[in-house]
Image (cartoon, rainbow, N blue to C red):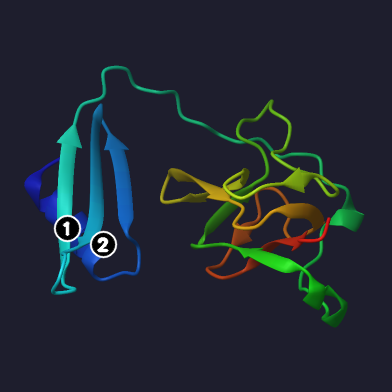
Amino acid sequence: MDEKAIKKLIRLVEESDIDQLEVSRWGKKIKITRRLAKGNGSAADTVMVHAPQQQAPAVQPAPAQTSPQTVESKPSDADKKYVEIKSPMVGTFYAAPAPDAPPYIKVGDKVSVGQVVCIVEAMKLMNEIESEVSGSIAKIMVENAQPVEFGQVLFLIDPTG
């Protein structure tokens, strides 16, 4: 990747709300991380460029079987007791890590803080979305391979479950 492309990626991170961007092309991997400088509150970006020893195969999650009654489009007033897991970015929602793999979670499953619940693909990068709360999955709000928006509700978690 040339210097011009790297500078463009750095500007993308600086002009957005994201804290980290990782791009892999032609055996080279570039990771841009925004870190706050101590004391003055200004942002300093760090760029690391390296060639991985072994290229990992691309992950293409397959459509998982989701029953229609478990997928809802918008939370209702009755859902106020649930904690929402929202998409942190625009992308494509995938329920499973690979085409032949079972979904990460299904309705009724117990989840804990930090547990991966799905993938949102954005700009050819697979981003694992983790639960920020413990509880049980009450509703899955989107279907597999469906486009999602920033802040869109993906799951409702019953924290008492």
Label 2 secondary element: helix
Q: Position of residue 116 (x, y in %)?
A: 60, 43
* Residue at screen point 34% across, 69% down: 17
Residue at (67%, 47%) from the top-left corner? 112
Q: Secondary structure at mark 1?
A: strand
Question: Looking at the image, which residue sits at the far left?
Answer: 3
Q: Position of residue 42 (x, y in %)?
A: 16, 72
Residue 13's tag is: 2
Q: Which image quadrant: the N terminus?
A: top left
* 1 or 2: tag closer to the N-terminus: 2
Residue 30, compared with residue 43, is above or below; it is: above
Image-quadrant location for residue 31: top left
Q: Is residue 127 above or below residue 89?
A: above
Residue plotted at (31% across, 45% down): 22
| Mark whose residue sits in front, 1 or 2 | 1
Depth order, front residue of 16/158: 158
Task: Name the quadrant of the C terminus.
Answer: bottom right
Q: Which numbered circle lies on residue 86?
A: none
Query: Residue 7: image x %, image y %?
Result: 12, 56
Q: Residue at x 60, y 62 (%)?
A: 148
Amino acid type of the residue that numbered disc 1 sits on in the rendered structure:
Asp
Rendered position, 148 above or below 136: below
Q: Which residue is mark 1?
A: 45
In the visual, does 126 lie left or right of 144?
Answer: left
Identify the residue at the far bottom of this view.
Answer: 77
Q: Residues within 10 Å of mark 1 (few under 14, many from 20)?
A: some
Categorize mark 2 by other alpha carbons within 10 Å: few (<14), some (14-19), many (20+).
Answer: some
Query: Is any part of residue 5 visible from this angle?
Result: no
Where in the figure is residue 158, as x and y percent of width and height? Answer: 80, 61
1 and 2 marks in contact (CB < 8 Å): yes
The quadrant where residue 63 appears: top right
